[in-house]
Image (cartoon, rainbow, N blue to C red):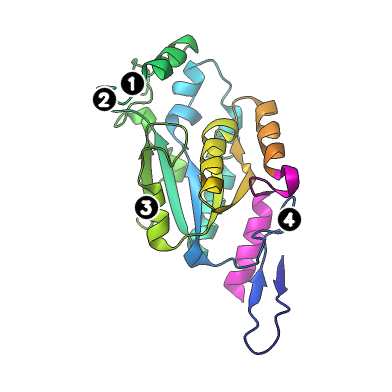
Amino acid sequence: MTAIGAAQGSNALAKTFIEADPYLWPHDGHLQPQTTALLVIDMQRDFCDPDGYLAASGYDIRATRSIVPNVASVCQTVRDWGGLVIYTREGHRPDLSDLPPLKRWRSERGGGKIGTPGPLGRLLVRGEHGWDIIDELNPQPSDVVVDKPGYSAFFATDLERILSTRGIRNLILTGVTTDVCVHSTLRDAVERNYECLVIEDACAASILDNHASALSTIATEGGIFGAVAKSDSLRRTLGAALRA
């Protein structure tokens, strides 16, 4: 929804909000493309393809596949509006020198040992076919791609440098998985004083209950980790801003 601020005098500024839970986002109505970035977390073949890492670990990927149209639509809406789109890819060096022994052990125990051969190449290894972004969401020349070795997009990457250089204050999060990499990135962002919005139908988890719980956690205590919105709400608000 869009509202006009009640500030007095000729300096009154139009305020723009996205309808969200538990509050209209952002809290101050200062929603501008130059200070907003969309994060597309790990929409890689390894997480969204039946021959990838997540499926090899025994999980049903129908949920991660189902959000692709919404993620694509949100990306294009943000681009048209003038906001920055940032993709992330989780993966490790071909020699696995950045893969901690505990993570390697856990992945083997889960049935998808990182670095082992699969139909799409070595699982979660940089440069392999499975590691790259799915075809439906190919990054555009104006987009940024951040490669990460861990769950949070802020850990061991230059993401914070990119955001601070551009003066970004507001982050919109989409991608997979809601309870792991999306939530890890969200929590790190909140600690860095970014105001975050998670698009619930443009995120997915390998376990449906985990998705619902992760979203519920965001909205507790008046929005302790930000707010949650539907993709339609985002499209309506940004579409109206473009037509204004």
Q: Earlier in the sequence, mark 2 or mark 3?
A: 2
Q: Please determine whether, in this image, residue 222 is positioned above or below residue 45.
A: below
Q: Earlier in the sequence, mark 3 or mark 4?
A: 4
Report the amino acid beneath label 1: Arg
Q: Label 3, label 1: how many angstroms apart (C-alpha)?
A: 30 Å
* Secondary structure of the residue carrying numbered label 4: loop
Magenta residues, as a range? 219-244
Q: Which residue is mark 4?
A: 23
Q: Earlier in the sequence, mark 1 or mark 2?
A: 2
The residue mark sitting in front, 4 or 2, is 4
Q: Earlier in the sequence, mark 3 or mark 1?
A: 1
- In magenta segment, residue 43: no
Report whether residue 143 is seen.
Answer: no
Q: Nearer the viewer, residue 98 or 73?
A: 98
Residue occupying the point 34% across, 15% down: 116
The residue mark sitting in front, 4 or 1, is 4
Q: Which residue is mark 2?
A: 94
Mark 4 Cα-neighbour bin, 10 Å: few <14, some 14–19, many ≥20: some
* Secondary structure of the residue carrying numbered label 3: helix
Report the amino acid beneath label 2: Pro
Q: Quadrant of the N terminus?
A: bottom right
Q: Label 4, label 2: how many angstroms apart (C-alpha)?
A: 44 Å
Q: Which residue is mark 1?
A: 122
Q: Are marks 4 and 2 in contact (CB under 8 Å)?
A: no
* Secondary structure of the residue carrying numbered label 2: loop
Q: Please determine whether, in this image, residue 176 is positioned above or below residue 61.
A: below
The residue mark sitting in front, 1 or 2, is 2
Q: Are marks 1 and 2 in contact (CB under 8 Å)?
A: yes
Q: Nearer the viewer, residue 24 or 138?
A: 24
Q: Label 4, label 1: how many angstroms apart (C-alpha)?
A: 43 Å
Q: Label 1, label 2: how many angstroms apart (C-alpha)?
A: 9 Å
